[in-house]
Amino acid sequence: MNFQDLEHIETADKYIDIALHAAEKQAELMRTKSKTQNKLGKSKFIEIEKITIINKVLTAHLNKILESFPSIDNLPIFYQELIKCTLDYPMLKKSLGAVNWAGMKISDLTEKMITKLKMANDQQILYTARKQYYGRVCSFVKQIKENLEYLEHSRRIMKNFPAVKTSLPTICIAGFPNVGKSTLLSRLTPSKPEIKSYAFTTKSLNFGYITIGVKKIQVVDTPGTLNRFEKMNNIEKQAYLAMQHCADIIVYVFDLTEQYSIEKQEQLFEVVTKFDKPTYIYLSKTDILPPEKVKAFHKKGFVIYTNKDELEKELIKKVMENKELSKRSYD
């Protein structure tokens, strides 16, 4: 899922200006092209053309907004939950509904006004009807002013959502920042991995892919924290939701150089295991650790990997032996 292509949403006044300008431009063209000698007939033709253009321009812009935003209820659960924890979900749905309402109101009014203009028998009725039409159309658009502003606010946030391929088998690498997760990611995806950053603050989610022939396994570097969900920053919430809703397997990285205490790392490990996903432990930076420290950690009873190749072999085996995951591994 990629939200990078969501287009900028203008203000209500801007959409009105665009539509009125297009209508006046078309009217000028019609005045030079119309060959009828009947003044009333010519005026009818021009006024109908103007409101037709206004309707066409406004509904095109409003429909484009509706089409560019995905159907939220049909998104993968990861994105539904991400939207709910980063945006005002009811306001987002209400705003999309308001845009739809305005488009229908404008189209309905245009149809009725064209009929009225066709039946007009003098110039004054034409001008009065056109003035009424402009006023009501502008009113419809201005009524959704706040909705358009909120949709633009939402678009800017959603553009920074990570492009998780929710259909692929996914391995999440978990652990505190700077324990060696990114290094492991780059080692698991050695053949020029497709690693991207999606920044919210100063951190990012990183993605890479293990390729086996035509099959792919998605690997996600997810920063960890012991904060409660409501206290997490946006990137930490992304990581938590990725492990909860996208991960098929979790690799937890321990760092015995103790930038974070072993006690805190074990606490985070307990949090991660509550996701109830197959979980592997990788011990990082063993090349700079005293052998006795590594040996002592092994005595804790965990199944621990210190060799990247052995871990990768086990992860691929785990995915390929699972029929459902293996079937999903085609990008």
Image (tube, helix red, strand yellow):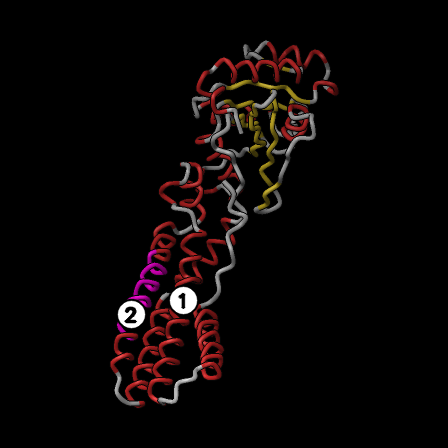
Q: Against 137, is 166 above or below? A: above
Task: Using the image as rendered, state which of residue 43 and residue 174 is in the foreground.
Answer: 43
Task: Using the image as rendered, state which of residue 200 and residue 15 is in the foreground.
Answer: 15
- Which amino acid is tagged 2? Glu
Task: From the image, give the main secondary structure of the stretch colored magenta.
Answer: helix
Give me the residue at 43% from left, 45% from top: 83
- Give the crowd class for mark 1: few <14, some 14-19, many >=20 residues within 10 Å: some
Q: Quadrant of residue 205?
A: top right
- The answer for how far apart the CA atoms under marks 2 and 1 are is 12 Å
The residues colored magenta run 97-113
Which mark, residue 102? none
**Residue 194 location in percent, x, y?**
64, 34
Q: Label 2: which residue? A: 111
Which mark, residue 56? 1
Q: Decide whether residue 64 is among the magenta residues.
A: no
Q: Residue furthest right?
A: 288
Give me the residue at 63% from left, 28% from top: 181
Residue 174 appearing in the image? no
